[in-house]
Image (spheres, helix red, strand yellow):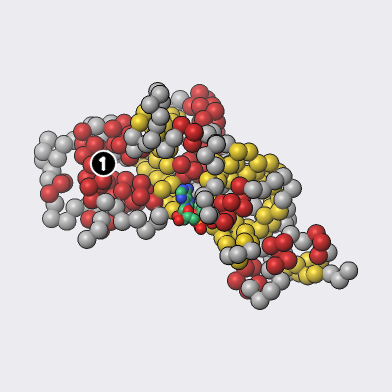
Amino acid sequence: MSEVIVPNFRGRAARGRPEVIAGAVAERMDSRWSSARRYDRRAVVTATEALTPTGTVRVDLEVVDGGPFDFEPGNFVGIEAFDPGLGYRRSPYCILSPPSHDGRFSLLVRVVPDGPVSQFLGALLPGDEVAFRGPSGRAMVRLGTGDERDLVLVATGVGIGPFLSLAGHLLVGGYRRRIDLFWGLRLADDLCLVDELARLEDDHPNFSFDVTLSQPSPGWPGRRGRVTDLVAEALDGLAGRRFLLSGNGAMVAELAAALAEVGVPQLDVYEEPFFDARHVPDPAVVAAIRDKFVAGGALPSPAAAGLDLFHLERPLGADRLAS
Ligand SMILES: Cc1cc2nc3c(=O)[nH]c(=O)nc-3n(C[C@H](O)[C@H](O)[C@H](O)COP(=O)(O)OP(=O)(O)OC[C@H]3O[C@@H](n4cnc5c(N)ncnc54)[C@H](O)[C@@H]3O)c2cc1C
């Protein structure tokens, strides 16, 4: 049996027998190597769990390429999958677990119909090998910078993943300011990880989370409606807070535009759209969220504050809206 040379994560050659090389790795021995080699890190699946009947899975992985794996909440890995019909497909996934230095990490994945990489991740079994690159991306909030602020975390769907990593990391690390998490889902069947969130809430009085469903069944006893409305109604002020938004690109863009309109500096808003990243905010939706911030008491009414925020020639969030 002849040997196959498999370039490893540092670009050096390693030797392996063809029968032990994962299909995707062997496929890479072709002329596409040059574009694929950034995905030359390897992790092995240690566990998987289907978390919802609607297609949300947790995948636990362990890095096995011998390279370092240090990350901060908000960082993501790029996963590569080989689809016989489509070729190599790559998509980024935020890390769900809090930072650790043992090479272990978890992903929270929504399996998307006709989505090749999410389908690949959703079908993994313990022992399977995954090709990836990273971790990459920005840190959401750093501990110990001396700039502790109240944090407002707003997620839809699997956008909750990086916030679990962040909240766990900050709270265990002694973060003293408030961390309030608002999570929007479509159905009660989409709910997951509630025990983990409840544990954080029990252990840390400065943490809270609230869930709302946009399409609940009639018997749903909890909150209903869009997560943007929930945030706007729940906050009693905006000053000094940092806003972190993650998930559906429409939610992220529209809430960010509304926050800009009510005067929150852009630097205090962190955006992580998972899909529909080029969504152009709908002016009517933005106006409705903005009005809820005023009605909910987060902002003094423009008249009371002597402001004319809503009739500015160029509203603060105008550059985010369709012309
Ligand atoms: C920085 C970043 C971090 C991300 N982190 C995560 C994560 O932690 N978990 C996760 O599941 N996804 C995450 N995503 C989305 C992920 O990268 C893929 O877009 C998604 O899994 C679909 O990829 P695919 O290759 O299977 O299908 P694709 O062919 O890339 O996408 C198929 C279709 O599904 C849409 N789509 C993608 N995600 C969703 C969704 N959640 N709900 C509905 N439609 C969707 C796409 O817009 C596209 O139209 C992240 C995206 C970015 C940019």
Q: Residues within 10 Å of mark 1 (few under 14, many from 20)?
A: many
- Against 67, residue 97 (above or below) is above
Give coordinates of residue 184: x percent, y percent.
40, 37
Residue labelled 1 has its Cβ within 8 Å of some atom of ligand 1: no
Is residue 300 at all visible to an observer of this figure? yes
- Against 316, residue 292 (above or below) is above
Q: Which quadrant is the C terminus positioned in?
A: bottom left
Give coordinates of residue 272: x percent, y percent.
43, 51
In this rendering, the count of numbered labels is: 1
Residue placed under numbered mark 1 in the picture: 289
Give coordinates of residue 217: x percent, y percent.
40, 29
Q: Residue furthest right?
A: 1
Q: Nearer the viewer, residue 108 or 176?
A: 108
Is residue 170 at all visible to an observer of this figure? no
Q: Residue furthest bottom?
A: 31
Residue at position x 43%, y 46% in the image: 246
